[in-house]
Amino acid sequence: MKLLRYGPLGQEKTCILDIEGKIRDLSAYIKDLSGDSVSLENLNKIKALNLEKLPICPDGDRIGSCLADAPNFFCIGLNYAKHAAETGSKLPDEPLVFNKATSAIIGPFDNLKIPKGSVHTDWEVELGLVIGKPCYQVSQDDALSYVSGYFTANDVSERTYQKHRSGQWVKGKSFPTFNPIGPVAVTSDSFNPHDVRLWCTIDGEKRQDSRTSDLVFGIDHIVWYLSQFMELKAGDIINSGTPEGVGMGFNPPKYLKAGSVVETGIEGIGSITSKTVAFKR
């Protein structure tokens, strides 16, 4: 299944794509996509519906973020070897975990806002995943059975905030609009995360192009690892890491400016496109 949120900002309806690509209104069965509503148990109920009986949504409306919110937002850093090398970082012995504010989540085609005074705003295409049931100290063999869906994410980063402002990376990762997600959440029963292509272009120029088979720590390892230290909840989301080709990796570095167009995509899920604008209150 491919689930999405459709409508004006703050008025999105929960929808589903049918086999012909038509957007159908699912809001009579799921009020919104977040928390327990994206649990495996709840999504299994949706599978039993006859999609042809659901109303078709009118064309031309906005596609919102595929999840309205999340209880927790975790990210994995330096999870592709070539990306670690381009940043001059040592490859971690264990997954490098950091948090991101859920207020950074925006829709897949919403504007990406450059922070005031920033000259080091960067892009990072990533495979995102959502947890589907309570997950604590599970085995790696069973880890993927706790995932309810996957989506395309752009883990936007302000490198000065991240690298040179002391403390945790979260400060460079959490500015409003710094995590477009979508265009759909593909349920785990119809997506294999182990070897799919992911890419990023800036103004039509390819910057990132890799496969999830190049992950240092695979999706099953990430879920298993996090569950050793905390209980993951239904609706928690995880960005799994970005491949080489980020702005800070170029010589000289290349960063986003107002007016840039950023497209990030993942095979089997789809692409998201953000125009960058200067932040204004």
Image: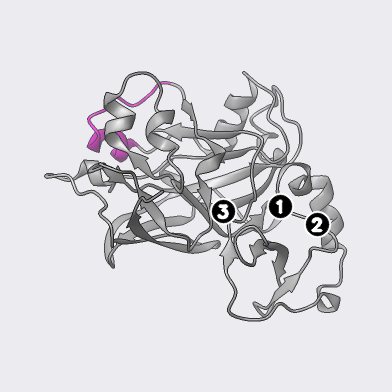
Determine contact: label 2, label 1, CB under 8 Å.
yes
CA distance for labels 3 and 2: 19 Å
With respect to residue 183, does 75 lie above or below? above
Q: Is residue 48 left or right of residue 63?
A: right
Residue, disc 2: 30
At horizontal 54% and vertical 46% (from top left) the residue drawn is 128
Question: What is the three-letter code of the residue carrying label 1?
Answer: Leu
**Residue at 62% over, 18% down:** 229
Q: Check disc 3 and report the residue beneath it.
A: 151
Q: Position of residue 58 (x, y in %)?
A: 68, 81
Residue flagged by tag 2: what amino acid is it? Ile
Q: Residue at x 25, y 46 (%)?
A: 247
Give the Cα distance between marks 3 and 1: 13 Å
Residue 1 visible within the image? no
What segment is highlighted magenta in the picture? 81-93
Query: How much space separates mark 2 and mark 1, taking CA atoms?
Result: 7 Å
Closer to the chain start, of discs 3 and 1, is 1
Measured from the top left, where is residue 129 in percent x and y?
59, 45
- As helix, strand or loop, the secondary structure at mark 3 comes to strand
Q: Which sits in the foreground, 98 or 120?
A: 120
In this rendering, the answer to whether 264 lies above or below 116 is: below
Q: Which numbered disc, 3 or 1, marks the residue closer to the eye?
A: 1
Furthest residue to the front?
281
Q: Quadrant of residue 89?
A: top left
Q: Secondary structure at mark 1?
A: loop
Please check the rendered image and state whether residue 256 is part of the magenta-colored stretch, yes or no.
no
- Residue underneath mark 1: 33
User: Callout 3 environment at 10 Å: few (<14), some (14 to 19), or many (20+)?
Assistant: many
Q: Is residue 181 left or right of residue 70?
A: left
